[in-house]
Amino acid sequence: MTKHGIFRAFSDETRLRILHLLKLEEMCVGDLVAILDLPQPTVSRHLSYLRNAELVETRKEGLWRFYRLAPVDNQLQERLFGCLGRCFQDIPTLDQDAARAVDLRESGRSCCPEVAQNRSGSAGGSSC
């Protein structure tokens, strides 16, 4: 994607929230929906945009699809990902999202609990 497309990906609050969460850890769609408190189609649409911008990538495990930040392959991407931690550290919404992510993980209410507990092994279950 062009630099213009990467900047457009960073220009939306929901996409920034998703990127910030994925900077913390890999997540499935269901957990992102729960943390962001947004409808699944909205989250999926933003994830698709981020995938097209080559900022996130997916990993499929059983019925689940996990999202993570894409490996950095250029200086612009490296600086933008770095900015996720530095430039947005005082935004309450991002802090609240991170706290909900920790709560979701620690409470065992993850959408994909078997996979979350054993990411290196395979697990069955329903889709997120």
Image (tube, rainbow, N blue to C red):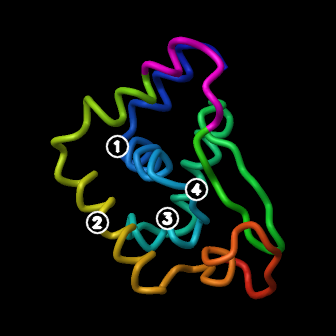
Based on the picture, tell me whether residue 74 belongs to the magenta stretch.
yes
Asked if the residue under mark 1 is in contact with the one under mark 3, i.e. CB atoms within 8 Å, the reply is no
Residue highlighted by disc 1:
13
CA neighbours of label 2 inside 10 A, class few (<14), some (14 to 19), many (20+) = few
Q: Which amino acid, by three-letter code, is at mark 3? A: Leu
Amino acid under disc 4: Glu
Residues in magenta?
A: 70-79
Q: Residue at x 28, y 51 (%)?
A: 94
Mark 3 closeness class: few <14, some 14–19, many ≥20 residues within 10 Å: many
Image-quadrant location for residue 1: top right
66 left or right of 120 in image: left
Which SS class for mark 4? loop
Q: In the rendered image, which residue does mark 3 sit on?
A: 32
Q: Which mark is residue 99?
A: 2
Percent x, y of residue 100: 33, 70
- Name the amino acid, label 2: Ala
- Which residue, given by chain and number where applicable, does mark 4 sit on? 26
